[in-house]
Amino acid sequence: MEDPTLDQFVRIFELNCRKRGLRFHKVMIAYLQRRHYVPTHRPLRACHLRDILEQVIALCRYRGREPTITRELLDAACRAYFVDTDESRATRAGGRLRRRPALES
């Protein structure tokens, strides 16, 4: 199975929003693509959107909020969903992975 085109990716996002009762905002998929796919050369995968939206919903429930899509929630969902083991990318500004200091014997 081939990766979706950008137009198909947008449509998948819209369908996943509708299925989960979330308001579809085209600007949010543009933000997601521009912030979390283009800079890392991450390929578009059809399953990503379902999983990221589930992360957004889980974060909203945890915070006691009505599920909604925001840039902040998309960023948090992507940090939890995409694991970057390349330290040169993961430790850049805004990255979550930090080198642990060596334990002394």
Image: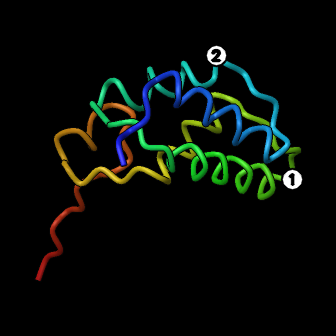
Q: Nearer the viewer, residue 104 or 33?
A: 33
- Residue at 28% x, 44% y: name it: 90
Q: Position of residue 3 (x, y in %)?
A: 37, 39
- Alpha-carbon distance for marks 2 and 1? 25 Å
Q: Position of residue 2 (x, y in %)?
A: 35, 42
Label 1: state its secondary structure.
loop
Whether residue 6 is situated above or below residue 60 in the rendered picture: above
- Residue at 54% x, 21% y: name it: 31
Left or right side of 102 for 91: right
Q: Earlier in the sequence, mark 2 or mark 1?
A: 2
Q: Which residue is mark 1?
A: 64
Q: Residue furthest bottom?
A: 105
Residue 58 in which image quadrant:
bottom right
Residue type at numbered disc 2: Val
Whether residue 69 is situated above or below residue 64 in the rendered picture: above
Neighbours of disc 2 within 10 Å: few (<14), some (14-19), many (20+): few
- Residue at 74% x, 38% y: name it: 17
Residue type at numbered disc 1: Gly
- Residue at 72% x, 21% y: name it: 25
Whether residue 104 is situated above or below residue 16 in the rendered picture: below
Q: Which residue is mark 2?
A: 27
Q: Nearer the viewer, residue 42 or 13?
A: 13
Left or right side of 105 for 92: right
Quarter of the image that includes the C terminus:
bottom left
Left or right side of 102 for 47: right
Q: Position of residue 33 (x, y in %)?
A: 47, 25
